[in-house]
Image (spheres, rainbow, N blue to C red):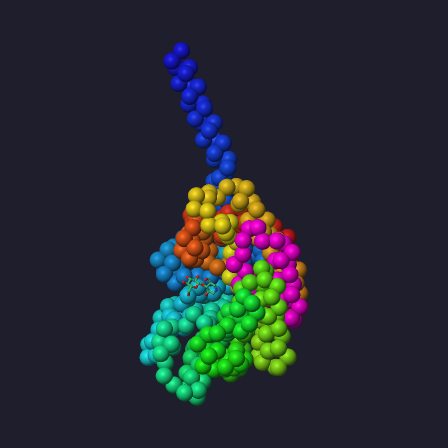
Amino acid sequence: MKIYKRLFAVTLLLLFAACSKENTVTTIPYITPEESDGVSLKSSAPFPWGAAVNVSLIKSNAAYRALVEKEMSSLTSENEMKMSRIRSSQTAWYFTDADYIVSFAQEHNIRVHGHTLIWHRSPAWLDTYQGDAAAWEAMFKEYIQTVVGRYKGKVTSWDVVNEAINEDGTLRTSIWQQKLGNDYIARAFQYAHEADPGALLFYNDYGNEYSTVKREAILALVNSLKSRGIPINGIGLQMHTRYNQSDVNLANAINSAAQTGLKVHIAELDIAVNPDNNQSLTFTSSLAQQQADKYKFIVKTYNAIPKAQQFGITTWNLTDGDTWITGEYKRPDWPLPFDSNYKRKAAYQGILDGLK
Ligand code: 9MR
């Protein structure tokens, strides 16, 4: 009798374990990057597929590096090409990490997209920089041309200006805007173009999918630069989005960018599944599937814009273990196509489905 009771209890336990497993992503089939099944994002996409990468992970983590080599045909440095890294003080120029990323990419035949030349999140020394209008202009020009010039012919494209528009559609008050005037944006493009006439130059921002006001302001800005003959080649849609963003909004963001006639880069894609900051959320198979559907929709919509305008899609880092979101918002989240064990998630299949 006792043995039957035990057996019954064990069966119940096993059943319970199976049911709760059913509800987690562990049941979703994945293929490890080491398995060479011939499938990769770069070979599946008819346009460059990229990720933002982190230099210390590239250097120290073989699984991370292998994943980049296997899956990516484009990369963006997540932080190493920002002014806060390259010129952290007026006299300190630091290129070691950016150079490393560029050499790594060249070795593996991966395109490099430069991020970012001019941004409101600038190094602190600029706040106390003493100089008249001419000195500011010279320093601004020198910075852009030193960086673009160093990577001439090696970095294909640049986010020349990043996030210059406010949520309400007005021009953001940044140190650059205050010291150089509203037209600093146009001059940044001109200086970058002088330093590398072959580089493709982008305006990059977020919010096109969730705010009509901001989207219209961004489009007005790039259209005006274009009509003035300022050398702008593309628009970057960061697209830090969420699993429950509406398809209509996502399609509007992508299609309205394409209507400018410029190249369109989905430049920082990630799809949060915990936008409400629920500290105890778990990543269920249902959430994984909804996220996969959203990846599919975005990729499918992008794949339908004119080929000549498809600059590529870049996710903001590669795996759920490396995303900026968990650190920034102090919450669990799983926004990327690979899990923290470098394994493909349902989102990966969603991307492939979107490319069909
Ligand atoms: O992901 C980046 C994070 O590691 C940095 O701390 C942060 C500040 O430099 O920038 C993050 O990347 C941002 C990108 O450069 C511009 N768009 C928004 C990204 C997420 O904040």
Query: Considering the image in quadrants, where does the N terminus appear?
Result: top left
Does residue 300 sit above or below 192 in this rendering? above
Tell me how many marks there are. Answer: 0
Residue depicted at x 44% and y 87%: 133
Q: Is residue 228 left or right of residue 101?
A: right
Magenta stretch contains residue 256: yes
Query: Looking at the picture, how far across and down is residue 105, in whole percent?
Result: 45, 65
**Residue 89 location, quadrant:** bottom left
Residue depicted at x 59% and y 49%: 293
In this view of the protein, can residue 221 be seen by the observer?
yes
Frontmost residue, 320 versus 110: 320
**Residue 211 location, quadrant:** bottom right
Does residue 110 sit above or below 291 in this rendering? below
Query: Looking at the picture, how far across and down is residue 255, in whole percent?
Result: 65, 63
Query: Looking at the picture, how far across and down is residue 298, in whole percent?
Result: 60, 56
Residue reaching furthest top? 1
Query: Looking at the picture, how far across and down is residue 235, in whole percent?
Result: 57, 69
- Identify the magenta region: 237-266
Frontmost residue, 196 versus 187: 187
Where in the image, quadrant-wise, is ligand 1 located? bottom left
Magenta stretch contains residue 308: no
Residue depicted at x 38% and y 77%: 126
In this view of the protein, can residue 157 be seen by the observer?
no
Residue depicted at x 43% and y 49%: 332
